[in-house]
Amino acid sequence: MIPDQLFEAAIEYRKTKLWNVLSDHEIFAVQHADGEIGYCCVMGMIGELTALAVYPGQAGLDSLRMLTDDMPLFDELAQMEHMRSQDCVMVSFEVRADLPPRDLAAAQDYGKRNGVAFRGRNAFPHFERFRPGYERWYLEDEDDQRRMLDGLQAAVELARRLQRSRWTNFITDGALYDREIPLLIPEGDGWRLERHALPPMAEIAYPTAPLTDDLTRARLMKGKRAGQWAAKFFRYSTPISDEGGNDMIPFDDLTQPPYYPMTLMVVNAANGMVHCMELADDPVQWVEDLGNAFLKTIAKDGLPTALLVEDDRTEAVFGPLCAQLGIRLERREEIEPLDAVLDEFLERFGDGEGDTSELEEMFEVLRIPGALEQLPDEMIAQSLPLLEMGILPDDIAENLRREIERRGL
């Protein structure tokens, strides 16, 4: 349940219309009671979204930088991952029809108890938590609620101070790397305003997947040999929930946020044949799952002579493992067979933004008696990645396996 203080602070913030004064690049900071710095971003100047986001600490600030100053221009997969790497709490102001039922009920309850009517355009406060690798979720955690409250109260104070021209020199524009921003620090019943130098972006520490079992290493080294492979890690483009098994259940009925699984794709560098398409069960601790999937692929298809990669993460994860198995790891700007498979993947299973209606419609069609038998081999083959990822409902998955066996595919 959202505390009354948050609704009160959100209503007060909306009255300031601070988004008419600050752009989303003119950030400021607030110091929380535990000493952590929250970096605050005001949205609304261009009219698309009216909101205030608080990005906690170094990790939060760097996730904001990824959105504003480090967004890839021509890599759709990387763009989607950057968008889903936000680490912040946010309040936006919405029309009633756009609020989830749970949040609408909370706002109406607050209004009824306090004699407040949310009238006007985008009058309803909507509180959310964004975590890397997860779908946006309700603002449930007390620490997150306190961060949001601090950000709102600091924004109201900054709006007051910005009415005096002598404070405007605290607001500076430019990239979120090397400049100073206003820092508001609670002090008694008021606030102290200081300059705060933005810390440099933290160096990314990629995980690795070394092979720790000598017997497995020896067995794989003695196995058959394969040609050159290409590999890439990326975030799956549609959120997945473990609740309800393989059956789709409405978002509003979930008790935990859906997640975007880290995915490993391995293809033959000569012909683009897919050797491995695996999703990790944990969106954060994914390296062990996908490292083991790579080892199983080697055991099944042979030891590649070389592994081609396009990005720092895939190179870092597989570097030690390739060294242990005598696989040449080679960095390329572009790997045409891999890129072609990824483009096809995006075309089929592209950014769904949490909308499962198309999948649900497909499931209903596949449940029609005789529907699978009427599909051509090509369409059956196209459904194999969904079967391997385990996201098909149990009844459809079983029928699909039988049809594949019947056709000898």
Image: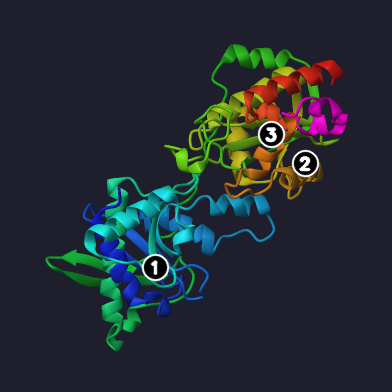
In x, y percent, where is residue 54?
A: 37, 59
- Image quarter in which the C terminus is found: top right
- Callout 3: SS: helix
Q: What kind of residue is marked 1?
A: Ala
Residue 123, disc: 1
Cα–Cα span, label 1 and label 2: 45 Å
Q: What residue lies at 33% left-to-right and 78% top-to-bottom?
A: 170
Q: Amino acid at mark 3?
A: Phe
Of residues 223 and 396, the one drawn nearer to the viewer in this rendering: 396
Residue 45 at x, y = what percent? 47, 76
List the residue tagged with mark 3. Answer: 363
Sequence-wise, which precedes: disc 2 or disc 3?
2
Vertical placement of 233 versus 40: above or below? above
Q: Is residue 393 left or right of residue 339?
A: left
The answer to whether residue 36 is seen in the rendering is no
Which numbered tag is attached to residue 406? none
Q: Residue at x 37, y 64 (%)?
A: 40
The three-letter code of the residue at mark 2 reads Val
Q: Could you tell whether 120 is left or right of 223 in the image?
A: left
133, 298: nearer the viewer: 133
Whether residue 336 can be seen here: yes
Q: Which residue is mark 2?
A: 341
Is 337 one of the magenta-colored residues? no
Residue name at image x 37 percent, y 71 percent: 180
Picture quadrant of residue 124: bottom left
Of the two numbered discs 1 and 2 on the same chain, state the one appearing first in sequence: 1
369 is within the stretch colored magenta: yes
Give the class, few, some or many, for how many residues have Cα within 10 Å of label 3's Cα (few <14, many ≥20).
some
Magenta stretch in the rendered image = 367-383
**Which label sits in the foreground, 1 or 2?**
1
- Along the horizontal axis of the image, is 405 left or right of 261? right
Q: Secondary structure at mark 2?
A: helix
